[in-house]
């Protein structure tokens, strides 16, 4: 006659989800990702934790995003700009049910949905950062219209040049309140994008046609769907990208340039204004950068306490 034990053994499967979440919440996101392959339950729990971490981290309440975008020749003169958070399309507080990111998505592909999220930021020139540009006017072109607080990079191509380059560095920084002093800084992505002459001309012609039809209808705060043609990616993994608007620069006839009048309509030299509209960053990469920054700050604070603190008595 077999007797059932009075106190059955407690297994992992018998523990409630609240206990697992309490334990797993102390793990970093990098440490959590391998646990998704344990079983379906761990996959769902890890996915839920990462989902809510993205909700808390992507607005960058404790950090700011600093963008460096410059021609290689203007590295020392082009100032960096801060970026304002616009949103993360597809990410909502609803983890389950209708309208959620994972609606009608297989369990095995739900983590891929998270990896495909992008957070959008708008580069903006703040008052203390406004200064006259050191690039562009020397080429004999004049801007058309006033860009306001838009971030503009001027691009000029000579007749023998088929492309220009912009160095792009996205940094996650902490700024001391009331000052411009950086308390911490970590690089999210550092790369180069190429602006091909043909692409610049096509984008410029397209924007001229669309301006009169869309400028009065679209709101700048509403999210817009962007194709790969609108975004230039800094890296092959498409971690960081820039959405740009291109407009031509008018030739300034008062500028003394030794070019014959008959040659000014040729492709000997073309100028464009590239307006940096939005910065796209893969949301999971942004989350990892925030966690890494916080971990580095903990290490630095520990070192400060050990080196600069008073002697600790063992008695």
Image (cartoon, helix red, strand yellow):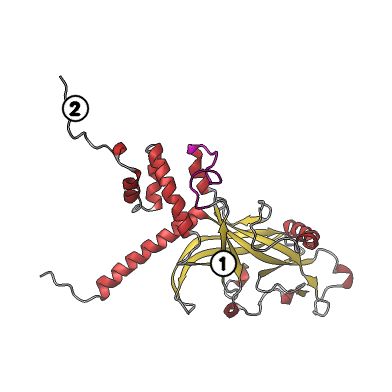
Q: Is residue 300 left or right of residue 210?
A: left
Which type of secondary structure does the marked residue at label 1 adopt? strand
Residue 100 within the segment the image draws in magenta: yes
Q: How many C-alpha atoms fall within 10 Å of the one at disc 1: few (<14), some, or many (≥20)?
A: some
Determine whether 205 is above or below 97 in the image: below
Q: Which mark is residue 27?
A: none
Q: Secondary structure at mark 2?
A: loop
Query: Can you name the residue that lies furthest to the top here?
Result: 1
Name the foreground residue: 123 vs 188: 123
- Residue on which the image places disc 1: 84
Task: Kindly identify the residue that appears in the image at 50 percent across and 49 percent down.
Answer: 94
Relative to 118, is 253 on the left or the right?
Answer: right
Residue 234: quarter of image = bottom right
Sequence-first tag of 1 and 2: 2
Q: Nearer the viewer, residue 106 or 151?
A: 106
Name the spot of residue 176 as percent of width and height, x first.
44, 75
Image: magenta residue range? 92-108
Q: Give residue 124's quadrant in the image.
A: bottom right
Question: What predominant SS class does the magenta segment belong to?
Answer: loop
Q: Residue at x 24, y 37 (%)?
A: 10
Q: Taking 183 as reference, is 300 left or right?
A: left
| Residue 260 painted magenta | no
Residue 203, image x and y in percent?
74, 58
How far is disc 1 from disc 2 in space, using C-alphas?
63 Å
Task: Name the image quarter holding the N terminus.
Answer: top left
Q: Residues within 10 Å of mark 2 (few under 14, many from 20)?
A: few
Q: Residue tagged by mark 2?
A: 4
In percent of the image, x 65 and y 56: which residue is there?
231
């Amino acid at each position: 006659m077999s007797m059932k034990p009075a106190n059955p053994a407690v297994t992992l499967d018998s523990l409630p989800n609240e206990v697992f979440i309490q334990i797993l919440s102390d793990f970093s996101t990098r440490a959590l990702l391998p646990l998704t392959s344990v079983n379906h339950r761990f996959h769902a729990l890890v996915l839920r934790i990462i989902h809510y971490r993205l909700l808390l981290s992507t607005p960058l309440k404790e950090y700011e995003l600093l963008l460096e975008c410059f021609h290689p020749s203007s590295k020392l003169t082009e100032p960096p700009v801060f970026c304002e958070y616009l949103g993360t399309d597809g990410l909502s507080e609803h983890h389950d049910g209708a309208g959620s990111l994972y609606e009608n998505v297989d369990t095995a592909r739900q983590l891929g949905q998270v990896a495909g999220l992008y957070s959008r930021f708008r580069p903006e020139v703040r008052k203390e950062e406004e200064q006259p540009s050191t690039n562009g006017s020397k080429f004999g072109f004049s801007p058309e219209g006033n860009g306001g607080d838009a971030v503009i990079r001027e691009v000029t191509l000579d007749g023998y040049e088929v492309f220009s380059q912009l160095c792009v560095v996205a940094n996650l920084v902490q700024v001391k309140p009331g000052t411009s002093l950086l308390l911490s800084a970590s690089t999210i992505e550092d790369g180069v994008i190429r602006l091909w002459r043909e692409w610049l001309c096509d984008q410029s012609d397209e924007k001229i046609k669309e301006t009169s039809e869309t400028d009065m209808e679209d709101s700048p705060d509403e999210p817009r769907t962007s194709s790969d043609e609108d975004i230039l990616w800094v890296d092959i993994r498409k971690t960081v990208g820039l959405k740009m608007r291109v407009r031509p620069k008018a030739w300034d006839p008062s500028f003394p340039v030794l070019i014959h009048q008959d040659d000014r309509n040729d492709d000997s030299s073309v100028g464009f204004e590239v307006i940096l509209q939005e910065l796209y960053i893969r949301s999971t990469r942004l989350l990892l950068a925030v966690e890494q920054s916080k971990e580095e700050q903990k290490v630095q604070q520990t070192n400060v306490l050990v080196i600069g603190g008073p002697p600790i008595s063992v008695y």
